[in-house]
Amino acid sequence: GVVIAMIHVMLPFAVLPMLTNMRGISGAYVQAARSLGASEWYAFRNVYFPQTMPGVMSGALLVFVLSLGFYVTPALLGGGRVLMISEYITYQIQEFLNWGLGSALSVALLVATALVLLVAARFVNLRATLLDRK
């Protein structure tokens, strides 16, 4: 139930960057590929789909970062059976007063997020994609 609820909440955050990116792609590219003899599948796979990757990456990164701090839905629906990292950090700091482990996990989460964003920035111009500039 928790995974389905998380998908339900996070789906718009994934779809909106992809939709914005896809609306910006001119249909003339696919039309040109079709006029040069490409099949519909080939034109989609080799012309249209690669141009959608910045939007897909932006949506995936946005959902990834938002999911790291996801707290309310798993706490309400999981009933303590499904423990997300943010809940675990909260329990360590507030319930068990284990500030060391809570702080270490928080820093590890921050470093992991920064590394994922840096790796993604190598493949996609995030600034241009997120600000919708080309």
Image (tube, rainbow, N blue to C red):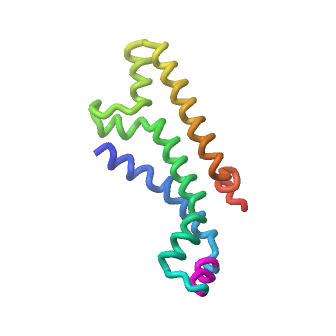
Residue 34, magenta (yes or no): yes
**Quadrant containing the N terminus in the rendered view:** top left
Q: Is residue 43 above or below residue 91?
A: below
Residue 126: x and y, percent? Answer: 65, 50
Which one is in front, 63 or 120?
120
Residue at x 29%, y 30% (from the top left corner): 80
- Residue at position x 51%, y 25% in the image: 106
Percent of width and height locating residue 35: 60, 87
- Which one is in front, 66 or 76? 66
Could you tell me what secondary structure mostly forms the magenta stretch?
A: helix
Question: Left or right of 37: which side holds 105?
Answer: left
**Is the residue 76 above or below the residue 128 in the image?**
above
Image position of 81 with respect to 12: above or below: above
Residue at the image point whose x is 38% and y is 52% from the top: 8
Residue 59: where, in percent of width, then height? 53, 53
Write down the quadrant of residue 78 in the picture.
top left
Front one among 49 and 79: 49
Magenta-colored span? 29-35
